[in-house]
Every structure is written in C-alpha cells, then in structure tokens.
Amino acid sequence: MAFVREDNEAYSAFYVYTHQAQYVSPLRPTSSVRIMPYPLVIFDLDGTLADSLPWFLRNVNGVAERFSFRRVAEEDVEVLRGLGSREILGRLEVPLWKLPRIARHMRRLKAEHLASIALFQGVDTMLRALADGGVRMALVSSDNEVNARRQLGEAAALFSWFDCGASLFGKAAKFRRILKRSGVGAAQAIAIGDEVRDIEAARAAGIACGAVTWGYATPEALRALGPDLVFERMEDIASSLRSEAAE
C-alpha cells in the first residue's frame, strides 16, 4: 500500500507484528508510531454495549411461565450472575432442548421493546476511537442482526462484520468464522464480552478475551476465569487497546 509523505514522495507502508501480536501503523521516518495490540476486536452486544439486563429481569419470569422453567426471585439475581451458563440452566431447570425456542421468543420480545434498551453511555465514543485508530471491529451476538443494527444506530457502520444468532454455547464457532472472513489470525484478535461463556468461547477459539464488569455476570465470576483484560469503565476499552503514541 502506498503512503504519501508531506513532500509527496510515495513509499510503502510497513505493518509489523511483534511476538505479542501488536500491530504497528504505517511507519514514517519523522512521525510517531501508534501500536495496536489487537487489529481485530470482536464485541458482544447485550450487557457489553447495550444495557439490556434491566429489560431481561423485567421479562424473564414471563418467559419462565411460557416455557415452564423456574421463576427468578429478586434474591436469586446476584447468585445467578455469579454462575456459568450451564449452572444457570441447572438452577432454573431449563432443559437444553428448549433453548432454541426460548432464544427465538426472546429475540422477538426484545425487538418489540428495543426502543427502551439503550446503549451504555460512552459506547459511541469508544467505538469511534477504536475505528479512528485503525482497529477493525466485528459483532457476535445471540440476538439477530436486524435488532443489533437497530440498537447500534449510526455506530453499526463502524463494524466490518456481523455474525448474529449465536446459540448459548455457539459463540466459539462464530468467532472462528469471523477470523476466517477477516483474514486475521487468532493471535491478533480479542473478544470482549460480559459473561462467563464469552470468556470460554474466546478460549475455545484461541483468541484473547476481555471482560467488562458492568454486564450480566459479576466482576468476581469473570475475574475468577483470568481474562486477558478486565474493563471497569467504558473508556478503559479504547485506552487499553490503543497505546500512547511513541517515537
């Protein structure tokens, strides 16, 4: 790829990856170099970018009655947030064969209430900061792509790939498909989510994992699995994935 300096002399841009899979932007002899630890970031939607937990808690018992599994009492919420997906299914007595039907119903229900489910504050700024820094982004979600694009609004244009409709335990396959479509190696990608299953899926796909502490799972449950990065504030995502300019 050609790059033009101030004196209009064209020369090739160089992309350098270190042993830690760090991305180095096009080099110029007299300019700074911005290092990108992960050229590809794969985001989860619900609980990571979209504040959907309150909506879920308002509706879960209606779904429980419809599909005959245990209701969630107020005192159960924090306990469930500290568990993995299989443990949650066991506690609520949800058989695996019901999961596809429940997932389809939840997507339809969410579509009806999408206007009441906002993105977390700072999402747009964070995504634009990553995009401006040359990071390519993908979205892997259990929701469908129509809902995801509606929820992201104008920020949806910042994503290069969508792979939605993931089953409860199907995210690892989605991650691998994003890697294949993007042409990015597993060592150069990180998946960022808010649940135990997000970390497990990233590990199964051989990519790094980042966990946000404001979503469905408790920070303690996430940290217990030793994710590569933990984000306590939305702005920490961009600041952690973009190093300071260095000569």
Image (cartoon, grey):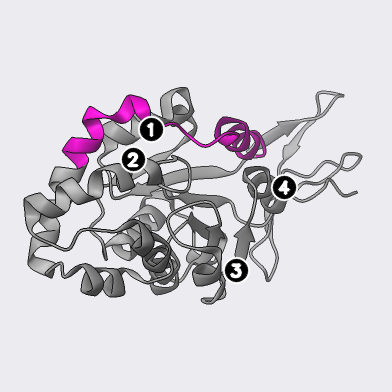
Three-letter amino acid code of the residue under disc 1: Ile
At 43% across and 69% down in the image, what residue appears?
82
Disc 1 crowd, CA 10 A, few/some/many (<14, 14-19, 20+): some
Helix or strand or loop: what does disc 4 sit on? helix
SS majority, magenta: helix
Mark 4 / mark 2, whichever is N-terminal: 2
Whole-percent x, y for residue 7 in the image: 87, 24
Mark 3 / mark 1, whichever is N-terminal: 1
Q: CA distance from mark 2 to mark 3?
A: 29 Å
* Along the viewing direction, whichever of 97 and 88 lies nearer the viewer: 88
Q: CA distance from mark 3 to mark 4?
A: 15 Å
Query: Where, by quadrant of the figure, is residue 106 drawn?
Result: top left
Query: Where, by quadrant of the figure, is residue 187 drawn?
Result: bottom right
Give the label on residue 117, or none: 1
Whether label 2 touches label 1, CB < 8 Å = yes
Which residue, given by chain and number where applicable, does mark 2 sit on? 55
Whether label 3 touches label 1, CB < 8 Å = no
Give the label on residue 228, or none: 3
The segment highlighted magenta reads 107-133
Q: CA distance from mark 3 to mark 1?
A: 29 Å
Helix or strand or loop: what does disc 1 sit on? loop
Whole-percent x, y for residue 235 in the image: 67, 43
* Along the viewing direction, whichever of 41 and 29 lies nearer the viewer: 41
Tag in front: 1 or 4: 1
Which residue, given by chain and number where applicable, does mark 4 sit on? 239
